Image (tube, rainbow, N blue to C red):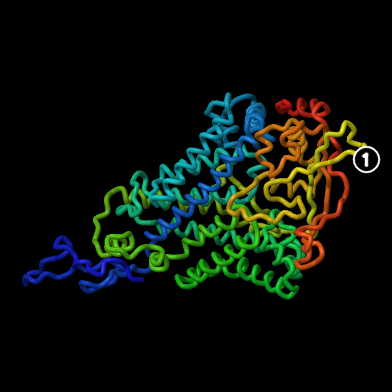
């Protein structure tokens, strides 16, 4: 790959050696450097990862930025003072369980810096953590500069939110972001803020840490499918996936109607990418690059066909470690004095390594031993016929198990929340009006949304609640109470409020429906309907605010005040 600086001068006098005959000879070049005549462009040598580090750090920062943005917009409503599952109450219960002390056991159970912060205004505390994460990740994303301190701060901030987020932060990509972010800490120098810290070359140990991560993610996802739902073995899972995935998008609407043979082909490709391709990472540079290309292409296809939060974007990140500077050089400008030219120039220089570089090598070796040790239960889980997915074996979530869609739901069910102003909820004449969520299916005529990499946490949990019961998801009754009170914070999680500008509803109920995509070009589609539905029955009975008072008291939830 050609680098910038076609008019670069020959090496400076400081880099030349005077021989006895008086001639000036160019010094012996560093291993991997490519000789070049004056006036030609410098070449990036294979097997170096200076540019790879920049791309990795910016990619991690982008995902952190999205995660903290979601947290800033939704944490108050979900885990704040008046949230659906207040984190202050959660921490109080953890503290009570450990005999009222914030000791090592409590910290190990829920590692979060919120233990040491002010709880009197939890909403502000949550906002400050999110805003600090947003500012720090934005700096790394824009500048491409990071050090261990900044990356560790991002990791601690997000770990602190995940460990008080309860069910709202129970998704596999939360642990995956933390593991990816932890690896990112060791990509950087301790203090120096530079895209090319001269005395801290990217460690091959850390690069292999990223490769080990993508290997486990993909192989874990493939094995959980083969061992799980029989439709993966029968090649029929894709007949259902597009329609029944948590939050479909418009592309999924059309992909669902693909012919059966195409769905079978998709399933075979999925198995190849997840069960065979991961081993390419160990087969040399060229096969590793092919691995990276295939994995990124696969994740892009998943992004196009579904709203899986930032999961697929995040899975692209460790795949970037499969590419060296030569492979990624096209992403950088070839202008004179640019990053690419500076990298090529650095490879031609003989450097005297300071003491700190040897200390760093010890740190990197220690890091590799930690990853190896924490990987033992993860590898045993991969080899186990009773494999579990999206599980952490350590409280800091440094090395985790992964997997997705081990089972596929064959029918889509939805919980639809409805309110009425009628005095009697059992009156056949009562008019029930529906609440729409930001993205999950509801209104039959509303086009499925595109939101990835953004994530509506409530919409996702409503998908899980639909094939469980409301007794297993008490937060949904809490949500009903807040809608009865028309709490402004909670209503911000909804797309519509049918009672806006008038008196709050007297009753809220949950109705259970079966949803199916309409047939493109068919009768329902011609009426503007993306979905058709059939009522299954009640999900939870009509409730009013007064009737929920004891329910709130028993759980120490703040009682909603009607606006």
Residue 174 % position (x, y): 59, 48
Residue in front for this viewpoint, 270 or 547: 547
Identified at 42% across, 60% down, the residue is 52
Identified at 81% across, 58% down, the residue is 532
Residue in front for this viewpoint, 422 or 474: 422
Under circle 1, the secondary element is loop
Residue in front for this viewpoint, 52 or 121: 121
Left or right for 193, reference 487? left
Q: Residue furthest bottom?
A: 261
Left or right for 427, reference 436? right
Residue 508 drawn above or below residue 188: above
Within the image, what quadrant is residue 444 found in? bottom right
Residue in front for this viewpoint, 233 or 66: 66
Identified at 35% across, 53% down, the residue is 195
Q: Is residue 401 visible?
A: no
Query: How many labels were placed on the picture?
Result: 1
Quadrant that contains the C terminus:
top right
Left or right for 151, reference 261? left
Residue 281 drawn above or below residue 401: below
Quadrant that contains the N terminus:
bottom left
Within the image, what quadrant is residue 541 found in? top right
Residue 453 % position (x, y): 58, 53
Identified at 65% across, 34% down, the residue is 489
Q: Is residue 519 visible?
A: yes
Residue 254 % position (x, y): 70, 66
Residue 133 % position (x, y): 49, 41
> Which residue position is annotated with label 1?
428
Q: Residues within 10 Å of mark 1 (few under 14, many from 20)?
A: few
């Amino acid at each position: 790959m050609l680098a910038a600086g076609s008019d670069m001068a020959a090496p400076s006098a400081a880099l030349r050696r005077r021989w006895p005959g008086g001639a000036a000879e160019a010094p012996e070049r560093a291993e991997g450097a490519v000789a070049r005549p004056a006036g030609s462009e410098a070449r990036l040598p294979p097997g170096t990862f200076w540019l790879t580090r920049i791309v990795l750090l910016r990619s991690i920062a982008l995902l952190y930025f999205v995660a903290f943005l979601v947290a800033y917009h939704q944490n108050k409503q979900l885990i704040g003072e008046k949230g659906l599952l207040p984190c202050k109450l959660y921490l109080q219960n953890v503290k009570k369980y450990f005999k009222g002390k914030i000791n090592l056991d409590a910290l190990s159970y829920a590692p979060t810096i919120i233990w040491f912060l002010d709880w009197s205004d939890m909403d502000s505390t949550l906002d400050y953590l999110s805003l600090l994460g947003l500012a720090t990740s934005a700096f790394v994303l824009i500048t491409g500069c990071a050090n261990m301190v900044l990356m560790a701060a991002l990791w601690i901030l997000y770990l602190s939110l995940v460990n008080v987020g309860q069910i709202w932060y129970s998704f596999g990509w939360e642990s995956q972001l933390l593991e990816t972010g932890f690896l990112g800490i060791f990509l950087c120098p301790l203090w120096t803020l530079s895209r090319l810290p001269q005395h801290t070359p990217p460690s091959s140990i850390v690069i292999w840490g990223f490769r080990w991560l993508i290997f486990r993610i993909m192989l874990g996802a493939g094995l959980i499918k083969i061992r799980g739902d029989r439709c993966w073995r029968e090649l029929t899972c894709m007949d259902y996936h597009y329609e029944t995935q948590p939050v479909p998008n418009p592309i999924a609407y059309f992909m669902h109607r693909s012919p059966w043979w195409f769905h079978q082909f998709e399933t075979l490709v999925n198995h190849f990418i997840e069960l065979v391709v991961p081993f390419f990472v160990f087969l040399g540079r060229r096969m590793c690059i092919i691995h990276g290309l295939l994995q990124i292409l696969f994740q892009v296809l998943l992004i196009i066909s579904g709203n899986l939060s930032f999961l697929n974007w995040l899975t692209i990140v460790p795949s970037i470690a499969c590419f060296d500077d030569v492979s990624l050089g096209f992403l950088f400008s070839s202008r004179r004095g640019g990053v690419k030219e500076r990298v090529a120039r650095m490879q031609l220089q003989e450097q005297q390594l300071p003491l700190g570089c040897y200390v760093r090598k010890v740190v990197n070796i220690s890091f590799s031993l930690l990853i190896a040790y924490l990987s033992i239960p993860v590898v045993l889980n991969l080899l186990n016929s009773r494999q579990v997915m999206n599980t952490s074996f350590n409280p800091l979530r440094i090395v985790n198990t992964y997997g997705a869609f081990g089972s596929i739901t064959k029918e889509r069910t939805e919980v639809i929340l409805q309110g009425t102003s009628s005095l009697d909820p059992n009156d056949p004449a009562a008019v029930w009006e529906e609440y729409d969520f930001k993205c999950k299916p509801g209104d039959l005529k509303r086009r499925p949304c595109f939101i990835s990499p953004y994530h509506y946490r409530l919409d996702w949990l409503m998908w899980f609640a639909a094939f469980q019961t409301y007794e297993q998801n008490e937060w949904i009754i809490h949500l009903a109470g807040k809608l009865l009170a028309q709490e402004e914070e909670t209503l911000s999680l909804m797309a519509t409020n049918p009672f806006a500008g008038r008196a709050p509803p007297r009753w809220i109920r949950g109705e259970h429906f079966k949803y199916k995509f309409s047939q493109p070009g068919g009768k329902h589609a011609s009426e503007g309907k993306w979905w058709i539905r059939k009522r299954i029955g009640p999900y939870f009975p009509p409730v009013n605010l007064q009737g929920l008072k004891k329910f709130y008291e028993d759980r120490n939830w703040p009682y909603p005040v009607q606006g």
